[in-house]
Each structure stands twice: as structure tokens, then as C-alpha cells.
Amino acid sequence: MYPSSGDESWRGVFVKEQVDALVDLFPNVHIDILHIKGSVSNGGSNINYFAGLWRYLVMRFKKNYDFVWAHHSFCVFLTLTNRKIPLIYTVHEGSLTKGVKFALIKKAISISDRVIYVNKVFFDSSHHPKKYFLPSGVDTNKYRPQLRSDCCVQLGLDTAIYYIFFPASPHRPEKNSAFAYSFIEKYSSWLKHENIQFIFGGDIDYELMPIWMNAVDCLVSFSNFESDGMVFKEAMACNLPVITFNVGNAQIYLKDEIAGSIIEQDHDSLRDKIAYWKKVGRSQGRDYLLTFGMDRNSVAQTLVSIFAEIYDGKN
């Protein structure tokens, strides 16, 4: 849940950008980061949580903090060793429906003083007395519309081709690349006739992602689940149309087909929406995104108002 050497460049970058935005707003405020590389990270292991517990205790012994802000349920449980200050838990995890992980997340929520949800459905169903709905913000200076031809030249892409972008690694099973591959096989003749090509991500450096989003013509996501859908918002900030299943906060960001389309899980729906956006061109997603206050500075300001409640004695 935080960028680190040797790991995927995109992992947890939205958490880092929230921290960076807070530092930009309040450069004199001190923020310490305790990053634990769990098993999901390259070179990580859940055994690292035991070492993380010791590191947490040392940090708490050395300094007097105003609050702890956790971004994973396991990290919430680490704080039980010293709960003399308020705990804020941002729920990023997408498995909130069943199983052991669901039980752990539910317990972590119950022992937190404040809970920030990035998913609207989970927020609405929560009974926590001090809850907030606040997805991560997008750096709209980084993710902005750029001239497609220039971006294509940088990446060596043909401007005559209509590119469909599957930004996730096709090797991550939860991203459901099988649906994309089966679509390509079924409609290979149609794709060739329409001069459409799919591009798959997975090894794209995060810093180059804004260039890719301005070079391609449409972004698709077929995930089995999403907590929020950060990639939706990044695409919207570049006016890149999005086609996705109804996961995460897609219903919020893509309603009325201003920024993209939500489809059923069938090939014909995908073909129809690709044809639609190929005709329409770029979306109006950036202006629409800003109406939600989803730029990183607006989100940081909202976070500050949540943190301020602690200082107002409303623990």
C-alpha cells in the first residue's frame, strides 16, 4: 500500500500522493510513514507484520503523535498494542462481502475511532458512528489532456490505429483479462476491419501512465471487484473514455455516459460501446471529475477537516 524499491511502481501510490498533498498544504506538520511489505508486494511477506509491530512500538515510544492513520486492516490490529491516541482507518480493501478477510476488515472497522471509506456502497451499509466517504484524489496536474499525436510519438504508436487500453497486468486474475482475450478472439475480424488494437499493461512505469492515457483512445476494465476505481478517475482527468463492469464507484463516475460506459459482462455490450466511443472520441470526464472534488488537493482539504475533529475534542 505504498511505493517501495523493487516493487511495482503503481502499488499504493494513491496513499503516497495523499500524504504528499498533506505535506504540501502543511509543510511544517510532521508525518512519519510505517510501511510494511506484506505478501502482496514483490519481495514481501506477512511475516513482516511481526517486525512492523516492533517498529511501531519504537516509533510510539520515541514520539508523541496526535493520531494514527492506517490503510490496511492488519495495520489496525498492530495499533492495539498502544491505543492512547485516536485511530483513523481508510478502508481500501475490496473484499468486504464474505470470508475470513471480510471478518478481519469488519473487526478492524469496529475498533477504529474513525473510518474513511473509498467505496460508496460499503459506506452506505456501514453502521460506524464516525464514518466518511472519501475516495483518493487524483493529481490533475499530472493527469491532464495532452496532444495525442505527441504522446503516440513518444511511445512509438501509430496514430492511425484506435487503441483499446487494458492498463492492468493480464497476469492478475482479479483483473479478468480472460474476458478481453475471449473478446479479441471472437471479434478478431471486426477489430481488424475497424483498425482497433488492444494494448495490455502490467509493465508500464507509473510515471508514464499519463502519456499512455493520452496516446490511447479508450480504457477498459473488467475487474471482478474494485474498492474505488482509481484508474477510472485517472482516465477521466485525461478525458479518456472508460468502459467497465459495474464495480467500485463506477456508478458514480460514469453515470450518464459523460466519462464512459458501464456494461454487462458480455461481448456484444463491449463491442457496442467500443463502437460508440470510437465515434464520439474523447470524453468530458475531466470537468465531470472536478465536480466531485476528486482532485488530490480537494481531497487533502477534506482529510484536514476530518483530522481537525480530533483537535476539537470530538474523539
Image: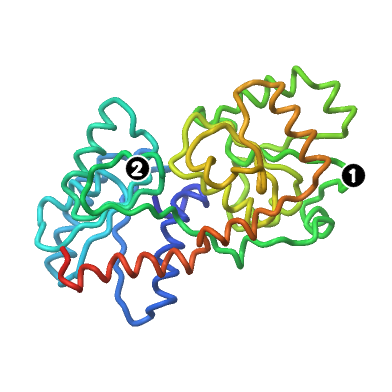
Secondary element under disc 2, as helix, strand or loop, is: helix
Q: Is residue 262 above or below residue 49?
A: above
Q: Position of residue 191 (x, y in %)?
A: 83, 28
Within 10 Å of disc 1 (Cα), the crowding (few <14, some 14-19, many 20+) is: few
Say if mark 2 contacts mark 1, CB within 8 Å. no
Q: CA distance from mark 2 to mark 1?
A: 45 Å
Q: Residue at x 23, y 42 (%)?
A: 127
Mark with earlier residue (2, 1): 2
Q: Residue at x 72, y 50 (%)?
A: 283
> Going by the picture, which residue comes out furthest to the front?
256
Visible in this render: residue 4? no
Q: Is residue 161 above or below residue 98?
A: below
Within 10 Å of disc 2 (Cα), the crowding (few <14, some 14-19, many 20+) is: few
Which mark, by number, is residue 160? 1
Q: Which residue is mark 2?
A: 124
Tell whether 78 sits left or right of 231.
left
Amino acid type, label 1:
Ala
Tell which tag, 2 or 1, sits nearer the viewer. 2
Looking at this view, is 287 or 46 the one in front? 287
Secondary element under disc 1, as helix, strand or loop, is: loop
Amino acid type, label 2:
Asp
Q: Residue at x 80, y 61 (%)?
A: 147
Tell whether 121 sits left or right of 201.
left
Q: Position of residue 50 (x, y in %)?
A: 19, 45
Q: Residue at x 43, y 53 (%)?
A: 135
Residue 196, by quadrant, is: top right
Q: Position of residue 121 (x, y in %)?
A: 39, 39
Which mark, by number, is residue 264? none
Q: Is residue 230 above or below residue 190?
A: below
